[in-house]
Image (cartoon, rainbow, N blue to C red):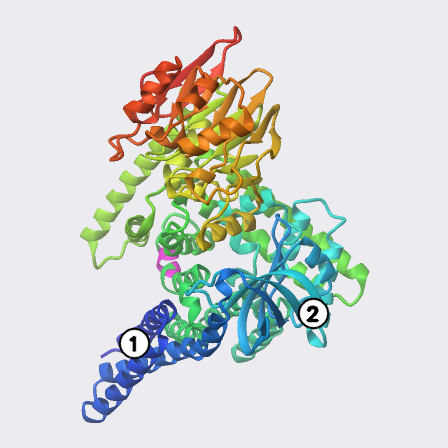
Amino acid sequence: MSDRMLLRRRTWRSVTVAGVAWVAAAGATATPEPGVIAVAAAIGALAAVALSLRVRHPAVIVAAVALACAAAAAGTVWSLAPAQRAIADLEVDGGRHLRVAATVTGHLNATPGGTTWFDATVSSVQAGATTVRGTIPAHIGLDADGAREASTIGPGSRITVSGTALPHVDTDRAVLTLRGSEIESASAPEGLWAVFEEVRDALVASTRGLPPPGAGLIPGLAVGDTSGLDPGTEAAMNAASLSHLTAVSGANCALVVGATFGLLALCGAPRGLRVGGALVVLAAFVVLVTPEPSVVRAAAMSAIALVAMGLGRPAIGVAVLAAATTVLLITDPWLCRSLGFALSAAATAALLVLAPPLASGLSRWMPPPVALALAVPTSAQIACGPLIVLIDPHVPLLGVAANMLADPAAAPATILGALACVAPVPWLRDGLTALAWIPAAWIAAVARTTAAIPAQNLPWPDGPAGAALLALVGAAIALAIARPRKIPRLTALATAMVAVLVGVTGATSAVRTVAGPLTVPARWQIAMCDVGQGDATLWRSGSAVALVDTGPDPAPLDECLRTLGVSHLDLVVLTHFDKDHVGGTGAVIGRAAVVVHGPPAEAADQRLLDRLERDGASVQLATMGMSGSVGATRWQALGPLPGAEPGNDASVAIDVSGDGFPRTIMLGDLGAEPQAALLRRVDPPRVEVVKVSHHGSADQDPALYHRLHAALGLIGVGAHNTYGHPTERLLGILRETATEAARTDTGGLLAVWREDDGRLALWQQRGG
């Protein structure tokens, strides 16, 4: 057997061990009894060891090691079981008031809504007369006032805070999630933590006089601090597949390590010293940006690539990657549920395994340095794409191009920013920061330009099927580029598949970005998207656009927004949290400026709101009488009604009016009783357009529709739905009030506007 074949076989053994550890971690973090998995894996490992004494076969030894690592990963989860039981005994899921003493362990992340969240290790939890002590992982949020009171805290700070516990998520590493209401004491970071906190603060301060958005990018590129980055640029970075540059990811670590490696090489240092010196600098960089799990993960992946490069053996790099992944999963099994961890592992593996053959294939048509520059982001895109579509069903067609344009600027911006952190005098720090602004401004310009191109994001099927399909497409692209000689027929088939894909994608993008918007009347003021059995209604005033509900799935809503030419939403109203009204919210992540919502019913509802807030939206709970403006229109919330339980009857009804705008009321999913209560409490005006409640169900109050006396009723309903919507009773009510019914199941996308002569105009995608 050749040395190369032996090396490959040993590599796959280490990958098998990592895979078994990953599966065990996933099982242990998902079950309330992780001890069962830990004990079972340990028994299996002992049995494999006993068998290996008789049967000297590598597979038995691999099984023993894999099961031992699985037992260790499950054992780590099991070790937290006593703390979980102790917290559960306090019955905190009901929102019980707690007092905790904790040490801050992570960055403070401020959301647009004013809440600041951070990871912490809690040493004591007091609930009434009961106190629980231990080492308890926690996630703590402070409101705007609390964050101001504790403005000096950072990693290493000790804090005592009172607040309300939020429902625990079994798959979350944090045993306790607390929304703080009162800060009793908070200390500043001490010792080494204080030194690095001052260094980071000095870098942020030195960027404040520079023009945005480049100024806000510098701390993100250098130390992962995005506090100065405006939401628009952050959303553009995400849309352009450049988000890995705005947080401390493997890219940042690799740039710092690469610069050190290159500098030592210029000094004539031998390979071993270059690798060792780069690892020391990497460790210092991790301490500088705070050793959060994501930072440690990124540093580990960069160290793997560095070791592989130092040894000159990519196959060994894969083995080291598998070993490091196993160690990280044993240390922190919850990483198995982290998309960031999976993306880091996939990107590193792609860099080691896929990039070299892609670079070799591309070098047939271009100079080798250009081929390598293109192969690196392409390999990462192929490996990471199937994971990304699980949470965002789009393929960034221009992601590779954006990375090729931005990556050359990322290196000087990151290195200059890192040097500014350690500059001994302020004038040198300011000078280095000013130099870093030039490449940072270029990166911001690339992100904004890419995100503004309508063809950038191609809608893709979501879920496991969509991920599998994209993985197949990625494999075909890799084969078509690398063109391995051993499988000529498969390579030819892959090449043909890629050619067809390019043609179909080009035609689809042309229809979506050029022909699609041209089919919709440019004067539309109200539009109802065809999202199936669900609601998604927009109104527009000038360049300002609002959206009420998002339908059941992101893909049809995203397609509707693109057809209408809508890329930014000034207001999103989530009337209530049924899936047919919020299931498509993924399509508005990063696009929404303000989100107004009905009362959340479950922990999942609050997590959705937290995600919107993290991605740049200001989140507000709707109250009766709340009002605001979108362009020249005014809106007012006519609900939720006081005392209504979360759900249909607590829907946020919206009244929209404005000069030259058709007076409109949108009723969410209100049933007959809350409709009657609304009629008694609000005395709604006559309107021109009504968004019919609950997709045209029979549960309607005729008196309300007679009072509204609308000329047009919009019904969001799915074709051939099993509910019988819209019902004959509702259609009869509309006929009694001389209200024309327009339905998405028969008309598709609906658009409404007021003509110059005051008449109401209706356009239907199917039927004109």
Asked whether 666 or 590 is in front, the reply is 666
Residue drawn at (67%, 70%) of the image:
159
Left or right: residue 54 compared with residue 661: left
Residue 564's disc is: none
Indicate yes or no whether the magenta region holds residue 359.
yes
Residue 13's disc is: 1
Mark count: 2
Asked whether 48 or 736 is in front, the reply is 736
Left or right: residue 151 compared with residue 95: right
Q: In the rendering, at what x and y percent does residue 152 appear?
A: 73, 64
Residue drawn at (58%, 30%) of the image:
636
Read off the magenta span. 355-360
Q: Quadrant of the C terminus?
A: top left
Q: Amino acid at mark 2?
A: Phe
- The residue most toward the top is 757
Asked whether 99 or 27 is in front, the reply is 99
Q: Is residue 498 above or below residue 672?
A: below
Residue drawn at (54%, 43%) of the image:
236
Q: Quadrant of the N terminus?
A: bottom left
In three-dimensional space, the C-alpha distance between marks 1 and 2, rounded to whole angstroms, equals 41 Å
Residue 196's disc is: 2
| Magenta: main secondary structure | helix
Q: In the rendering, at what x and y percent does residue 19 appear?
A: 32, 70
SS state under label 2: helix
> Callout 1 environment at 10 Å: few (<14), some (14 to 19), or many (20+)?
many
